[in-house]
Image (cartoon, grey):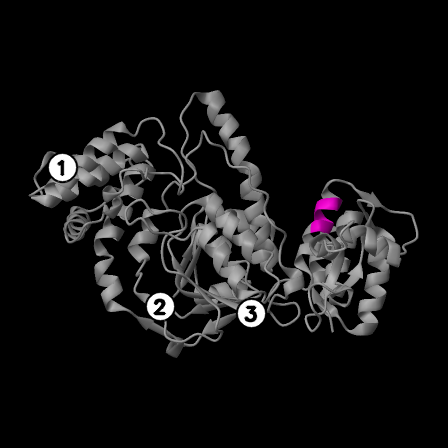
Amino acid sequence: MADLNRAGRAFARDLIAGDNIDRDSAWSFTADDGNTLLGDAGSDWANYGKHHLGIDTTENFDTKDHWKYPFAKDGKIYRSALVAIRQRSSSQKDKVVYDAAGALLDEIDGDTDSSQADAGKGPNAGGGVITVANRPPRIEVQPRSDLASSAPASPDCFSRWNPGIRAATADEPNVIEMFDVIGYDFWSGGGITADSVSSQLKSFSGQPVEVQINSPGGDMFEGIAIYNLLNQYPGKVTVKVMALAASAASVIAMAGDDVQIGQGAFIMIHNCWVMAIGNRNDMREVADYLEPFDQALRDIYVARTSMKANDVATYMDDETFIGAQQAIDEGFADTLLSQEKIKEDKKAAATSKSKIAALHIEAALVRRGHVPAAQARSMIVNAAGAGADGTPAVREIEKILTRNDGEHEGMSRGTFRALIRDLKSGTPAAAANQSDVMPGADVGSKPGAGQAELLTAIAAFKQVAKS
């Protein structure tokens, strides 16, 4: 029995998107065709493999027996090849390949609705668990350097996030833990990055992997990159939402072949959120730039659920938190995660208070107070190093966050003071000890404009910490 070759499916979709399609010719795939794909050295198995829709995991990667169901040659996908694959995979009972070939045929013929129905997506089709064949396609990412893509998650996420919720046990030996913000975290120097996930996946060599998520989200582009990595991983991906998969983390969760969610856990979905500065023409340009990302994310959620696109778009517009049972009913998840597989690491929860407070205040300043991220972080560093709640830095933040406006109700003073207490309980700006690490940037990025004031604040915080 053959499994789906997801690299092959992705290549097929790329060919279709580029209209590199032979709709009329009869299909044949000879030994010479295969040798051409292997190249002059006869060892380009990656190129050979991506022209096939199925794999036999019992055979070695570098043998022709490993690769099943060829569908393309000479830079084109053949419609007749997909028809032949449907016939052969049906007789071989290779349902995942059969479904994938049908979905590709529908893409070629422009019948996207029947594509989804045929692929068996959603909780009411095929028993509720999405198969490897039915994973949505990768999202093409073209981030812009003039936009701050690492805008903070919603403040509501941090009020709901308990980073101490972890897995008590794992069902697979290969585990990726995502118990942090997505993307580089300025406040701790940590975070879940595509580079770290890629390294772990490579070490697993195509074996089944379990991804444990408890994250408030973070960098949109980093989340999409991680989703793509999991989406193209050749082995089975089981996702466990331990407590929260919000924003970018919810996108990552959709890459699971099987998504389990804990009782009391939430998945939160919303539209892409970036920071930009400019006039009305600039803002229109940014809105146009973001719209395809919102559509791509919407399509990911639609593909995994039984919901209509308009309903998912409404959820995203409203920044919706989806509880465990609702997530299962609507297809965002497949099954309820057993309670004995979840535990609370109280030490991790306690030591994270200062960091969460910093993240919460930053998100509120940026998203509700419309304060630039660099300025918000400068204010927080000053407030964390202050000796009393009545200092100018604390009062300035309090004034911004507790005021009411037409869009949001201000934070209560009790909530704000609790956040300040948590902020002062530790050292949230661990990254302040890394003078080469800049806020709002991925690892390895260079300082941007408008960050000089933050460097000054960090230097001041260092002096306070030493005294």
| Residue 403 visible at all | no
Query: Pointers 3 and 2 in contact (CB under 8 A)?
Result: no
Residue 12: x and y in percent read 73, 51
Secondary element type, mark 3: loop
Looking at the image, which is closer to me, 213 or 175?
A: 175
Asked if 289 appears above or below 91 in the picture, the reply is above
N-term-proximal mark, 3 vs 2: 2
Secondary element type, mark 1: helix
Residue 438 quadrant: top left
Q: Which residues are magenta?
A: 11-15
Determine which residue is flagged by label 3.
Answer: 208
Determine which residue is flagged by label 2.
Answer: 166
What residue lies at 39% left-to-right and 43% top-to-bottom?
A: 443
Residue reaching furthest to the front = 41
What residue lies at 12% left-to-right and 39% top-to-bottom?
A: 463
Determine which residue is flagged by label 1.
Answer: 395
Q: Magenta residues: mostly which secondary structure? A: helix
Residue 176: x and y in percent read 45, 63
Query: Pointers 2 and 1 in contact (CB under 8 A)?
Result: no
Residue 348: x and y in percent read 26, 63
Label 3 – label 2 distance at C-alpha: 20 Å
Of the residues tagged 3 and 1, which is closer to the observer?
Answer: 3
Q: Point out the image quarter for the C terminus.
A: top left
Label 2 – label 1 distance at C-alpha: 36 Å
